[in-house]
Amino acid sequence: MQRRELFSSLASSVSGKKKQEALLRPPYFGDESLFRNECYKCDGACVTVCEEEIIKIADDKTPYLDFSYRGCTYCDECAIACKFGVLKVEEKKLLNAHVSIDNSKCLSWGHTLCFSCKDPCLENAIDFKAMFMPSINDKCIFCGFCISKCPANAIMLRVVS
C-alpha cells in the first residue's frame, strides 16, 4: 500500500465515508441505471447460467464480474437469461475495463521465466520482449483469464467508467 492510499483509507474511515468502487459489469448492457432499477426484481438468473461462475451479486442486488478464478468467454448466456432487459445480446461489447501489468510485481519483469499470463490468453494479447518483460497489446478483449493465473498478482484490472 502506498502512502497516499494509506492516508486516503484512514481519512475515509474517520469521516465514515467509504469510496464506492465501480463494479465490472457483464458485457451486455447499454444503460447502467437499469442495474439499479431492474435487478432487485430478479432471482439472479445470470449467475446461475454463467458456465465460468464469474458473475456475482453485489449488496445492491446487481451483477458484477469476479475474475478471481476464471474469465469471461462472452458466451451470451447471461444476456439470454436476463428477464428484465438489463443484459441484452444486442448490447454485447468488450468489458468496460483496462488491464495492465504491474512491472514491479511481475516475475518476468524480475527476470524469472514465467508465462503464466500468456498461456491462458486465447487472443495472443500478451507480448514478451526476449522471453521477459510482458506487455498487454491491443488484441486484449479484457476477458480476465490471465488475472487469476498470475502467481504474483501483477495483472491489474481497472474499471473504466
Image (tube, rainbow, N blue to C red):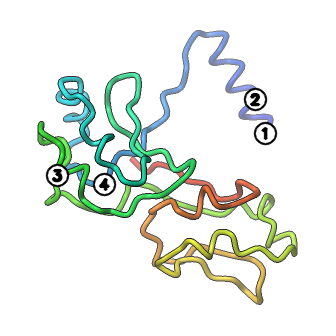
Query: Label 3: which residue?
Result: 80
Q: Residues within 10 Å of mark 1 (few under 14, many from 20)?
A: few
- Residue 38: quadrant of the picture: top left
Name the one closer to the observer, 9 or 111.
Answer: 111
Amino acid type of disc 1?
Gln
Q: Where's the N terminus, which quadrant? A: top right
Name the one closer to the observer, 4 or 129.
Answer: 129
Mark 3 secondary-structure assignment: helix
Badge 4 or badge 3: first in the primary sequence: 4
- Residue 82: quadrant of the picture: top left
Mark number displayed over residue 27: 4
Mark 2 secondary-structure assignment: helix
The answer to whether the residue labelled 4 contacts the one labelled 1, judged by CB atoms less than 8 Å apart, is no
Amino acid type of disc 4?
Pro
Residue 146, position as x, y percentages in the image: 58, 64
Q: CA distance from mark 4 to mark 1?
A: 32 Å
Name the residue at 69% across, 83% down.
128
Residue 76, position as x, y percentages in the image: 24, 59
Q: CA distance from mark 2 to mark 1?
A: 6 Å
Task: Answer above or below: position of 111 versus 44.
Answer: below
Name the one closer to the observer, 98 or 8.
Answer: 98
The answer to whether the residue labelled 2 contacts the one labelled 1, judged by CB atoms less than 8 Å apart, is yes
Q: Is residue 143 left or right of residue 102?
A: left
Q: Residues within 10 Å of mark 2 (few under 14, many from 20)?
A: few
Query: Label 1: which residue?
Result: 2
Mark number displayed over residue 6: 2
Q: CA distance from mark 2 to mark 3?
A: 42 Å
Badge 2 or badge 3: first in the primary sequence: 2
